[in-house]
Amino acid sequence: MGVVREYCSVITVAAGSTTITNIATVPLGKVLKLKKLYLHFPAGTNYELQVYVMKGPIVASPDTGYYTGDDSQISVQKPIEYHSGSTFSIKATNTNTTTSKSFFVYALLEEEEWE
Protein backbone atom coordinates (compact mmCIF):
# COMPACT_ATOMS: atom_id res chain seq x y z
CA MET A 1 0.00 0.00 0.00
CA GLY A 2 1.25 3.44 -0.92
CA VAL A 3 0.89 6.89 0.54
CA VAL A 4 -2.73 7.93 1.08
CA ARG A 5 -3.73 11.51 0.28
CA GLU A 6 -7.01 13.26 0.97
CA TYR A 7 -8.34 16.30 -0.84
CA CYS A 8 -11.35 18.28 0.34
CA SER A 9 -12.44 21.60 -1.07
CA VAL A 10 -15.29 23.88 -2.07
CA ILE A 11 -15.20 24.80 -5.74
CA THR A 12 -17.04 27.94 -6.82
CA VAL A 13 -17.85 28.56 -10.46
CA ALA A 14 -18.68 32.08 -11.62
CA ALA A 15 -21.94 32.68 -13.46
CA GLY A 16 -21.88 31.43 -17.03
CA SER A 17 -18.29 30.17 -16.88
CA THR A 18 -16.18 27.03 -16.74
CA THR A 19 -13.37 26.35 -14.29
CA ILE A 20 -10.76 23.61 -14.02
CA THR A 21 -9.40 22.89 -10.55
CA ASN A 22 -6.16 20.89 -10.50
CA ILE A 23 -6.11 18.50 -7.57
CA ALA A 24 -2.86 16.62 -8.14
CA THR A 25 -0.08 16.20 -10.67
CA VAL A 26 1.59 12.80 -10.42
CA PRO A 27 5.35 12.90 -9.67
CA LEU A 28 7.77 11.05 -11.95
CA GLY A 29 7.94 7.33 -11.25
CA LYS A 30 4.61 7.30 -9.41
CA VAL A 31 1.02 6.21 -10.00
CA LEU A 32 -1.93 7.93 -8.37
CA LYS A 33 -5.09 5.87 -7.88
CA LEU A 34 -8.44 7.49 -7.23
CA LYS A 35 -10.00 5.36 -4.48
CA LYS A 36 -13.05 7.45 -3.55
CA LEU A 37 -14.62 10.60 -4.87
CA TYR A 38 -17.65 12.37 -3.48
CA LEU A 39 -19.32 15.39 -5.04
CA HIS A 40 -21.86 17.26 -2.92
CA PHE A 41 -24.23 19.72 -4.54
CA PRO A 42 -25.85 21.96 -1.88
CA ALA A 43 -29.50 23.01 -1.94
CA GLY A 44 -29.95 25.81 -4.46
CA THR A 45 -27.49 24.40 -6.97
CA ASN A 46 -30.58 23.55 -9.03
CA TYR A 47 -28.79 21.12 -11.36
CA GLU A 48 -27.02 24.10 -12.95
CA LEU A 49 -23.48 22.76 -12.48
CA GLN A 50 -22.02 20.28 -14.96
CA VAL A 51 -19.06 18.48 -13.36
CA TYR A 52 -16.46 16.19 -14.94
CA VAL A 53 -13.50 14.23 -13.54
CA MET A 54 -10.51 14.90 -15.78
CA LYS A 55 -7.37 12.91 -16.59
CA GLY A 56 -5.19 15.56 -18.18
CA PRO A 57 -7.31 17.09 -20.98
CA ILE A 58 -9.56 13.99 -21.25
CA VAL A 59 -12.86 13.40 -19.43
CA ALA A 60 -12.24 10.29 -17.29
CA SER A 61 -15.69 10.20 -15.68
CA PRO A 62 -18.57 10.02 -16.26
CA ASP A 63 -18.48 7.93 -19.42
CA THR A 64 -21.35 10.00 -20.86
CA GLY A 65 -22.98 13.23 -19.75
CA TYR A 66 -21.88 14.96 -16.55
CA TYR A 67 -22.42 14.93 -12.79
CA THR A 68 -25.02 17.34 -11.44
CA GLY A 69 -27.44 17.67 -8.55
CA ASP A 70 -29.32 19.77 -6.03
CA ASP A 71 -29.13 19.03 -2.30
CA SER A 72 -27.51 15.71 -3.18
CA GLN A 73 -24.25 13.76 -2.98
CA ILE A 74 -22.76 11.63 -5.72
CA SER A 75 -20.27 8.87 -5.02
CA VAL A 76 -18.04 8.20 -8.03
CA GLN A 77 -17.14 4.51 -8.07
CA LYS A 78 -15.02 4.37 -11.23
CA PRO A 79 -11.37 3.48 -10.43
CA ILE A 80 -9.06 5.85 -12.29
CA GLU A 81 -5.25 5.64 -12.43
CA TYR A 82 -3.07 8.63 -13.17
CA HIS A 83 0.51 7.99 -14.30
CA SER A 84 3.69 10.08 -14.07
CA GLY A 85 3.15 13.64 -15.22
CA SER A 86 -0.61 13.41 -15.65
CA THR A 87 -2.99 15.70 -13.79
CA PHE A 88 -6.13 14.83 -11.82
CA SER A 89 -8.54 17.74 -12.02
CA ILE A 90 -12.21 18.64 -11.76
CA LYS A 91 -13.86 20.61 -14.57
CA ALA A 92 -17.11 22.42 -13.80
CA THR A 93 -19.44 24.54 -15.91
CA ASN A 94 -22.08 26.82 -14.41
CA THR A 95 -25.06 27.11 -16.77
CA ASN A 96 -26.65 29.86 -14.66
CA THR A 97 -25.67 33.15 -16.27
CA THR A 98 -26.46 35.41 -13.29
CA THR A 99 -25.38 33.59 -10.10
CA SER A 100 -22.19 31.80 -9.07
CA LYS A 101 -22.63 28.23 -7.81
CA SER A 102 -20.50 26.12 -5.45
CA PHE A 103 -20.09 22.42 -4.74
CA PHE A 104 -17.94 20.29 -2.45
CA VAL A 105 -15.32 17.74 -3.49
CA TYR A 106 -13.74 14.97 -1.40
CA ALA A 107 -11.16 12.67 -2.98
CA LEU A 108 -9.18 9.82 -1.46
CA LEU A 109 -6.05 9.06 -3.48
CA GLU A 110 -3.29 6.50 -3.15
CA GLU A 111 0.19 7.17 -4.51
CA GLU A 112 2.37 4.17 -5.39
CA GLU A 113 5.63 3.44 -7.18
CA TRP A 114 5.18 2.91 -10.90
CA GLU A 115 6.07 -0.62 -12.00
Image (cartoon, rainbow, N blue to C red):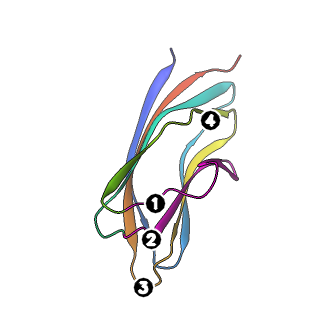
Answer yes or no: do the residues labelled 1 and 2 have beta carbons within 8 Å?
Answer: yes
Image position of 92 with respect to 4: above or below:
below
Residue under label 3, please give it.
98
Mark positioned earlier in the residue sequence (1 or 2): 2
Mark 4, Cα crowd under 10 Å, few <14 / some 14-19 / many 20+, is some
On the image, numbered disc 4 is attached to which residue? Answer: 26
Secondary element at tag 2: loop
Q: Earlier in the sequence, mark 2 or mark 3?
A: 2
The image quadrant where one finds the C terminus is top right
In space, the residues marked 1 and 3 are separated at their CA atoms by 18 Å
Which residue carries the number 2 mark? 48
| Magenta-drawn segment | 46-69
Which mark identifies residue 9?
none
In the rendered structure, which disc, 3 or 4, sits on the residue that comes first in sequence? Answer: 4
Give whichever of 10, 85 is nearer the camera.
10
Task: Kindly identify which numbered label has been placed on residue 68.
Answer: 1
Marks 1 and 4 close (CB-CB < 8 Å): no
Q: Residues within 10 Å of mark 3 (few under 14, many from 20)?
A: few
Query: Is disc 4 in contact with disc 2, using a CB cutoff of under 8 Å?
Result: no
Secondary structure type for disc 1: loop
Which mark's residue is nearer the viewer, 3 or 4? 3
The amino acid at mark 4 is Val
Whether residue 49 appears in magenta in the rendering, the answer is yes
Alpha carbons under labels 4 and 2: distance apart: 31 Å
Earlier sequence position, callout 1 versus callout 3: 1
Picture residue at 33% right of the left edge, 55% below the top: 72
Left or right, 60 with respect to 108, comes to right
Residue drawn at (54%, 65%), measured in percent from left and top? 19
Distance Cα–Cα, label 1 vs label 2 = 7 Å
Q: How far, Cα to Cα, is label 1 from label 4? A: 27 Å
Picture residue at 63% right of the left edge, 32% below the top: 81
Mark 1 vs 4, N-terminal side: 4
